Every structure is written in structure tokens, then in C-alpha cells.
Amino acid sequence: MIRLRIVRLVLEVSRPVGSLDAINLIKRLTELSNVKSVTVKFRKISARAQTLLLALEGDNLDYEHVSKMLSEFNITIMGIDEIQALSK
């Protein structure tokens, strides 16, 4: 069995207006284990929500931990746009 470690993960997410702002979102994401870098791009902004593109880089990123942290702030993952993995 080939074991992979995710080193880059790009997610399209929806963030309700009034929830965690972009700076604090970056801070929270970089507190997760193995996350070394976070980039946020604003895709669409409306009166009720923002669509963001989150690019996370690190060593052996854990999708489940990222997903759980985002859901704690009512941020919904709409899709995975990119994954880069390396063999262990």
C-alpha cells in the first residue's frame, strides 16, 4: 500500500458574513498541526456570504482536522480545487 502525505490543499469555502474574519481564519488554520502556510483569495462577496479559496501548504496536512475547524466557525467546504501529495 502506498502511503501519501498531503502537502498542498486548495478548498473553495463559503463563509457567512459576521463569522471569523480572514485574518483570524488564517491564524486559526496555521495553528493546526503541520500547516505551514495559508493563502486566502476572495472569489465572491454578497450581503450574506463570501466565497473564498483557501490554499494550505504544509507537511502531511490532515483534511479531517481542517474540515472540523472550519465547521466550528460555520464555514462550509464547497469543494476541493487542488490536492498535491507526496509518497512517504
Image (cartoon, helix red, strand yellow):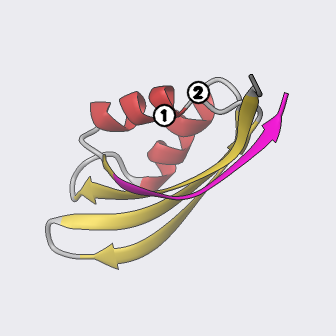
Task: Report the magenta residues as a range.
Answer: 78-88
Q: Secondary structure at mark 1?
A: helix
Q: Secondary structure at mark 2?
A: loop
Residue 66 is marked as 1
Could you say which is closer to the camera, residue 6 or residue 41? Answer: 6
Nearer the camera: disc 2 or disc 1: 1
Measuring from the top left, give residue 29's x and y in whole percent. 54, 37
- The secondary structure that dominates the magenta segment is strand
Residue type at mark 2: give it: Leu
At a point 48% along the width and 34% down the height, the residue shown is: 66
Could you say which is closer to the camera, residue 79 or residue 21? Answer: 79
Q: Is residue 74 above or below residue 55?
A: above
Measuring from the top left, give residue 63's x and y in whole percent. 52, 34
The CA span between labels 2 and 1 is: 8 Å
| Label 2 vs 1, first from the N-terminus | 2
Q: CB under 8 Å between callouts 2 and 1?
A: yes
Residue linked to disc 2 = 32
